[in-house]
Image (cartoon, rainbow, N blue to C red):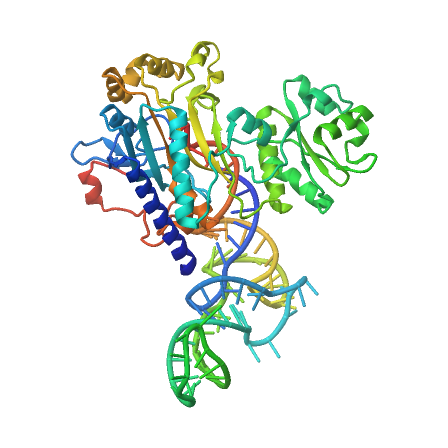
Amino acid sequence: MRRPMIQKNLFLRSRLAAATRRYFDENGFIEVETPFLGKSTPEGARDYLVPSRINKGTFYALPQSPQLFKQLLMVSGFDRYYQIVKCFRDEDLRADRQPEFTQIDVEMSFITEEDIMNMMEGLMKTIFKACLNKELTLPLPRLSYADAIGRYGKDNPDVRFGMELVDITAIVKDSGFKLFAEVAASGGVIKAIKAEQASTLSRKDLDGLKDFVAIYGAKGLAWAKVNAADWTSPIFKFFKPEEVEGISKAMNAKESDIIFFVADTPRVVNDSLGNLRINLAKKLNLIDPNALAFTWITEFPLMEYSETEKRFVSTHHPFTSPFLEDLPLMITDPGKVRAKAYDLVLNGSEIGGGSIRIHHKDVQSQVFSALKLRDEEARMKFGFLLDALEYGAPPHGGLAFGLDRLTMIMTRAESIRDVIAFPKTQKAACLMTDAPSKVSIEQLMELSLKIV
RNA sequence: GGGGUCAUAGUUAAGUUGGUUAUAACGCCGGCCUGUCACGCCGGAGGGCAGGGGUUCAAGUCCCCUUGGCCCCGCCA
């Protein structure tokens, strides 16, 4: 019902799509439509399933992305492909997540990461010029995954402001504050962030922040108000003078700054401080609403260990090419293998991501086996792709942008619903048409389905 | 699966520590104005506060349950 705002957003969305098509057309890309009724794949998000009437007991899956099709297009000799296409993922919704969403999907042959990033930077420049009349300065900055996590605690860092995480483990590993020393001794880390001139934060605010970091698994949040000669802090009395000095120096702390500490596993520390950093920046008004801070994130890990599945799973997807020099690690230390994958982050939001794909069958087999996909299983699920690699696939790679998220940032919308014409609710329902809804028993019988 | 928050006229909202006929703006209806176009003036209609239960002399205002919106954790290759 807030029609003027929605209308304005949809007009910008339309201009964004038009600029995208124009750019790719001018650069020799072909737009190819790929099937929506496809095959369910094991990796990744939950699939939306569509029962087949003709082949009873079998199901199509709506695509989570046109990933496999676009790779097959490369093998077929279409060297430059793009598509503005709906994708479907049956997961819980968020303010920036819908079960059906739109991607700008791209794939290119005979290219490297550099070629793709250059081409995509050109697209961003074109889009921002066409939609907002803003000039981007290229090339866009880059940050390795390890640096992003280390300095910002997240792989989608908002670099519109500073307040970086500082690792002070070395300074406090023998601290008089036992908790820090114990965490350091057990392989954990202690990191801190500094809110400059944050004396506006009350004692009550500080207590509230403790609850905030608890969401991310932190068991506590230590803080220290920096004074001329000492700190006002519940833990000040535990520290030796040289520790206080060391920390102040490492943080470059000045009077009236507030330092926050979290000690835990690297994951919990980065998670909680990374999110606290965003939270504080909003509270303290550190974010310039007009800023456009792009960052490429590179050198993602190829796979991560999943506690729930008790095996390594792909960070990106199973067709992502590893760094060839890291291949020996595939057996010894799979978590250390770097991937030729890259995300584009804008103002702390991941707006796109992609990778160079594997184009050798033996490398693909190594990855599958590291993922504990047995040969026959891999063959059953991705046989068509393995066959295609057999016939000689060109080096290729690509990327996909989230058109909805990009539109959100450009329109400054707070919810993805504000840039979609008929959005779904938190529970994935369409209030307009009342979907999803029950169907008749006849429809079910025709499909040989029974509600359990 | 879990945590939080909200639910008042067509719409957006205000409703203090529970207390007489529940407010406002926009919209709607009627009249006046008639060089209007984000007109102006006058006068109206319209809800019993998501649904159910409870506490109380008395409940939008407190408690419980249900339903739904929204935010977050998990999940999202």
Query: At x 75% / y 37%, what residue is drawn?
Result: A254
Looking at the image, residue B65 lies above or below residue A363 = below
Between residues A438 and A63, which one lies in front from this camera angle?
A: A63
x and y percent of residue A299 in the render?
47, 23
Residue drawn 38% across the image and 45% down it: A428
Comparing A438 with A66, the one in front is A66
Give left or right: position of A137 versus A100.
right
Q: Quadrant of the N terminus of chain A?
A: bottom left
Q: In this view, does A364 lie above or below B16?
A: above
Give above or below for A76 relative to B43.
Answer: above
The quarter of the picture where the C terminus of chain A appears is top left
Q: Is residue A334 above or below residue A196?
A: above
Q: Residue at x 71, y 27 (%)?
A: A250
Kindly tell me whether residue A430 is visible in this rendering.
Answer: no
Query: In which quadrant of the rendered view does residue A376 lie?
Result: top left
- Number of callouts: 0
Residue A440 shows in the view: yes
At which x and y percent is residue A294?
49, 37
Along the horizontal axis of the image, is A382 left or right of A171? Answer: left
**Image x and y of residue A408, in percent:** 44, 47
Image location (x, y in percent) of residue A163: 64, 36
Q: Which of A260 and B13 is in front in this view?
A: A260
Front-most of residues A28 and A363: A28
The residue at the far right in this view is: A229
Seen at 45% across and 13% down, the residue is A326
